[in-house]
Amino acid sequence: GDPRDLPSSPTRRSSDLGVSERKLELWREHGGGDLEPVLASGAVALLDAQWIISHAEAGGVLAHRQALPKEAFLSFADLVEATFECFGSLPVAALSYPWLTKDHPDPRGANLARVARALKALLTDNDGIIPRLGVFWDFGSLHQHPDPPNGVLRTEEQNALFKQGLGCLGTLYSHPKTWVLRLTSFPDGH
């Protein structure tokens, strides 16, 4: 595509994104520009915390990124619009958790339910300070091998994006303006 379509491009303006100039300035003041290259390229897709909550409450299991519906993700414009001055942080959280099996991190949805409960508390018990939150969850945010036991692997393009996404993990987890959510125990039965 046209490089001007990328949010990280200096020619990309708030009017191009459909967001207010102040929101884009605030996003960048909070260091959001550090994440723009991987969000713009599609290397990283952030899950909508509200979608995670709804999916878990419906008894769902998190699928790999390529199998998730479009509504599971927040767009770059959604993230910029969710940036608030009083919040003082980016509307981005990175999840750290143990994979439960080699091919799927949470085959029964146990961790999904646990993360959803924490996100629901975070989004509802905050006096409206955090209206939306984009969640980096490796299985849903980075391109995965769709079905490794049956030899279904990432495409070459997806593999390149996966590697680019891996390169930004340090930024996601150590950025002074992102949240880190940690699951420090295993669900029952593991």
Image (spheres, rainbow, N blue to C red):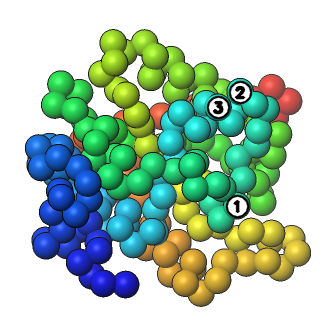
Task: Residue 117 in the image: state x and y as whole percent.
Answer: 60, 22
Task: Residue 170 in the image: state x and y as whole percent.
Answer: 36, 56
Is residue 175 shown to the viewer in this render? no
Residue 67 numbered tag: 1
Residues at circles 2 and 3 in contact by the CB criterion of under 8 Å: yes
Up the image or down, 71 lies above or below 33; here it is above
- Give the crowd class for mark 2: few <14, some 14-19, many >=20 residues within 10 Å: few
Q: Distance between the residues labelled 1 and 2?
A: 19 Å
Please give the residue where the numbered disc 3 appears in the rendered image.
54
- Left or right placement of residue 2 versus residue 23 in this view: right
153 vs 126, nearest the viewer: 126
- Left or right placement of residue 129 versus residue 118 in this view: left
Type of amino acid at the residue the image marks with label 1: Ala
Please give the residue where the numbered disc 2 appears in the rendered image.
57
- Left or right placement of residue 56 versus residue 35 in this view: right
Type of amino acid at the residue the image marks with label 2: Glu
| Residue at (29, 72) in percent of width and height | 6
138 vs 86, nearest the viewer: 86
Task: Residue 138 in the image: state x and y as whole percent.
Answer: 56, 54
| Residue at (37, 84) in percent of width and height | 1
